Image (cartoon, grey):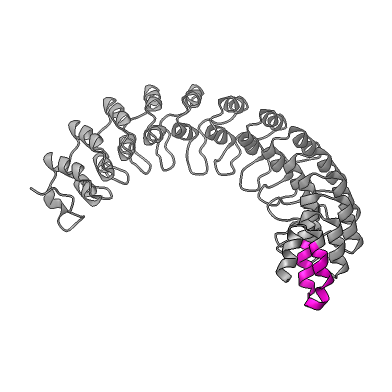
Amino acid sequence: MRRAFLTSARLDHDKITRIIVEKAVMLGFTSTEYNNGLSYASVNGNKEMIQLMIACGADLDAVTYGRIPLISVSLFSGNVETVQLMINHGADVNVPQRNGTTALQAASFSGSETLVQLLIDYGADVNAQGDSEGTALQAASSCGNRAVVQLLIDHGATVNAQGGDWGTALQRASSCGNRAVVQLLIDHGATVNVQGGDRGTALQRAIRKRNKAVIQLLLDHGADVNAQGGSEGTALQVATYYGDRAVMQLLIDHGADVNVKGVHDETVLQAASSHGNMEVVQLLIDYGTDVNEQGGDRGTALQSASLMGHRALAQLLIQHGADVNAKGGKYGTALQAASDWGYEPVVQLLIEHGADVNAMGGIYGTALQAASHRGYKTVVQLLIEHGADVNAKGGKYETALQAASYWVHETVTQLLIEHGADVNALKGHWHIQAIPSN
């Protein structure tokens, strides 16, 4: 019967719930059952059922299924009369649920100005912190409700309060792209360059939203285009990630450093090259970026382009002075990066422009070993035709033959042996089952 009671309350079946309640004393129901029933009634916004549960002794401030009834009503139904009823029966407007959320934060997120005013009138703390949204002001800023944001500020909300995943209200509003709310917060003293949260500054967040009006507004109010923060580093790197040339131009016009490195020591040009955006790369080159600047796991921009198989972009970089034999990063050289992923057209291009097929470096030692461990026969053949030393030692597998054998690439193993690879080098080392039998 207890299960039937909870099911009827959850499904909002008033008549069935009332019938069960009439027999509750006989069934030995406790306050726990009524608290559970109140929780479901609150989610459904059922005023009559809430009254019934209160009359049966349900605790209005009890945390049930992780929720407080008052918060459930504020977030899901937003019924002002029901909230008033619960307050009249003693509900505490500042009791948080398990994740820290309060009724005011829930009402602010839902955007109900009337409900927010009611809760404030009954003493709701406008600066209480909770869950991922932070404060009520941050919650209101996330949904772009200017009236609620103004109301909270009028009642003492701290504009620059830090909290939640988003940092401040300005950062949250910028993430949502609401220009009116961003302007309102700035007018009330929001710090434009504040750091906080895990997604960088307000400017970086506006760029992610690709809202040019908010971006321009922040720049007009002194946003630092070279501030480091978030997962990319600077605003220009964020714009590069999204391939937004117009925003990048705007940032450069406002003094963005085209050679700045991000949190992973990666340059803007490397990021653009990884994504294969020719227009963006050309823009950066036009503004004087260093095509051979080293940084991060990918070494240079040419290595980044080669690693991702962007032949046309690699050609563009070479035309503007990229060093095809520059060493650095995880893969050593651009040729090794292209060989590791089997991008034959890029390998051919690099060789045509003087790439050293026997250059040592990186995780696999040589380009031949990189191609061999993946089993890219055509790339292995191409490298050998251009003078790759089949017995060169170094790197993770020591030789190309050991790399091919370890991963049982029989055709590549055969090819290497046909071109003079030393079979004896395998003994006592890697697997030898890939060696073709005579």
Q: Where 330 falls versus 29 (above or below)?
A: above
Reply yes or no: does residue 38 show up in magenta.
yes
The answer to whether residue 60 is seen in the rendering is no
Instruction: In this rendered view, identify the residue nearer to me: 232 or 255.
Output: 232
Q: Position of residue 277 (x, y in %)?
A: 47, 28
Taking the image as shown, residue 218 lies to the left or right of residue 94, namely: left
Instruction: In this rendered view, identify the residue nearer to me: 24 or 417.
Output: 24
**Where is residue 276, by image quadrant?**
top left
Q: Position of residue 225 (x, y in %)?
A: 62, 33
Q: Position of residue 265 (x, y in %)?
A: 48, 42
Reply yes or no: does residue 158 show up in magenta.
no
Q: Where 50 falls versus 297 (above or below)?
A: below
Q: Position of residue 227 (x, y in %)?
A: 61, 39
Tell me which segment is drawn in magenta.
Answer: 16-39
Taking the image as shown, residue 341 lies to the left or right of residue 49, namely: left
**Where is residue 359, by image quadrant?**
top left
Taking the image as shown, residue 154 lies to the left or right of residue 205, namely: right
**Where is residue 364, by image quadrant?**
top left
Q: Main secondary structure of the magenta part?
A: helix
Determine the residue positioned at 52% across, 44% down.
Answer: 263
Determine the residue positioned at 66% across, 45% down.
Answer: 195
Total number of numbered discs in the rendering: 0
The answer to whether residue 362 is seen in the rendering is yes
Determine the residue positioned at 84% across, 46% down.
Answer: 152
Determine the residue positioned at 74% across, 33% down.
Answer: 179
Give the quarter of the figure containing the N terminus.
Answer: bottom right
